[in-house]
Amino acid sequence: MSILKRNYPPATALINAKKLGKNKAIELVKAIGLREYGVYNNRFVADEWGDFESGSQKPEKILGALNNSDTEYMLLEVIRENTSAVIEGLAIAAYLSGANAVEVVLPYEGKDLTEKVCEAFKDFDLAFSISYGMVNVRAVGNSIIHHFETSAAITALFEDSCSYMKTAVAAVKKYGDTIDKAVEFPYGKTIAEIAGIDENAGIKAIAVGSTLYGVSAFSLVVDEVFPLENGVITLYDSKCCIADQAEKAALEVRKTGCGKCTFCREGAIQIHTMFKNITGAKGKATDIGMIKEIGEAMRFSSLCSIGLTGANFALSSLQSFGDEVEAHIRRKKCPAESCSAFMNVYIAPSICDGCGDCLDVCEADCIEGKPGFIHMIDEFDCTKCGKCIEVCRQKAIIKTKGRIPKLPERLTRVGKFNKR
C-alpha cells in the first residue's frame, strides 16, 4: 500500500468499501483517524462524509485537487505516478458521501495529465469532469474537496485495511536548486531523517511548506498534524538573507492570489511592500508590528489556502529570525551581506584605467567618465546591480559593507589622483 504506487488492480478498494457498506466504511475511516492532507490537515475525512451521509442533503460533487497555495507542484507526482488510486479514492468518497459526480482540478502545470485522468475514470461508472487552474472556493457550494494525497490514501486504506500505514510524500529543495525526487515516508520520522541532513550540513534555516524554522527543526517529528502543506522542505544556507526570502515569498503570494479576498489581496501587497522596503534600506521600526498584525488578519479572514498560509513565511521569519530582520532596520545592515542596498560600490582610483566598459552596462546611467579619466559612481542613483563589477577587466570596482575610501570629486586623469 502506498500513496505513490498501488499494489492492487483498479476498483479493488471501491469493491471492498461497498462490501462493508456506507456506515461501516465511514466508521473504519473514522477509527483510523484519516485526516486531509495539505493545508487542511485539521479536518477528519470521515467527518466530512458523515455530515452528508447522516442528513438529507447530499454533496453536489467531490473535487480532487492540490491546495491553491501550492505553487511548487511537487505533489502532482501523486496523481502522475498513481493516477488510478487518486481517481478511485475520489470515487469512494462519492459513494460514501452520496455525491453523484467527481471533478478533478489540475493546475495548468499539470494539463499533461488529462489523458491519464480520463483513462483512469473508465474503471468507474461515475460522472466526472476536469477543470484547470485553482479551485474557486466561492463557487463549490456544498461540494467536498479532497487533496490528491488524501484520495490516494483512501484507496490504500480500503485496499488492505489490516496492513494500512499512514504515510506522506515530501521532497527536498536546496534554495536556488530544483526540487529533488518525491519520496514517501511513514509518519514518525524527523525532518532531518526525511531530508537526509545532519546538524553539520551548514544549514541556516528550513522551510517546510510556507513556514520557516531555525535548525532546531531538524528534530521535529512529522506526523499527521504537522503542517507539511505542499511537502517541500527547503534548505537555506548562511548566505541566504531571511528578509530577502520573506520579500520573495510575499511577492509569490501576490502573483498567485485571485484578488477577490480583500484581506489576502491587500495583506499580501502590504507585507511585500514592507519587506521590500526593509531589504532596500528603507524599513521603519513600525514595519515589524504591522507585518504581524496584517499577517494574523490574513490567516483568519481569507477563504482559501493562499490567504490562510500567505503570511506564514513572513510571520515565522520574524519569530525565528527576528533579530536578523530587525538588523536591516535598526542597524542598517544585512547580517547575511546579501542585500545590495546595504553595500557600497565604488571605483578604486588607483586601479581604474578609464576604459569605459562600466559606462556601457550601467542601466541606471550613474557612472561618469571618459577615456583616460578615472570613472566615478553616483552612489545615490546606483542600484548596486553589480553589472559594472562583472565587466571591469581591471577589477577596479569594489563592493563593500565597510567605509568608502577618499575618492575623486571630479573627473581626474588616470594616475593623477592624490588622496591627500
Image (cartoon, rainbow, N blue to C red):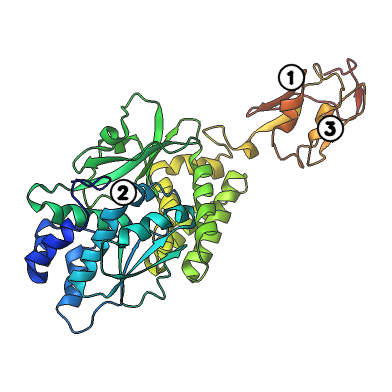
Q: Amino acid at mark 3?
A: Leu
Above or below for 7 versus 416: below
> Of label 1 and label 2, which has the lower sequence position?
2
Is residue 149 among the parts visible in the rendering?
Answer: no
Which residue type carries mark 1? Lys
* Mark 2 Cα-neighbour bin, 10 Å: few <14, some 14–19, many ≥20: many
Q: Nearer the viewer, residue 261 or 151?
A: 151
Is residue 223 found left or right of 377 in the rendered image? left
- For the point 46% across and 56% down, which residue is it? 111
Dot 1: within a 10 Å radius of its alpha carbon, few (fewer than 14), some, or many (20 or more) residues?
A: some
Residues at marks 1 and 3 touching, judged by CB atoms closer than 8 Å: no
Residue assigned mark 2: 228
* Residue placed under numbered mark 1 in the picture: 395
Camera-near label (1 vs 2) is 2
Give the x, y percent position of residue 104.
37, 63
Mark with earlier residue (1, 3): 3
Residue 42, percent across and down?
Answer: 24, 60
> Which corner quadrant of the image does residue 134 belong to?
bottom left
Q: Which residue is mark 3?
A: 359
**Mark 3 nearby-residue class (10 Å; few <14, some 14–19, many ≥20):** many
In the displayed structure, 262 sits above or below 271; it is: below
Q: Position of residue 243 (x, y in %)?
A: 51, 44
Q: Toward the viewer: 69 or 249? A: 69
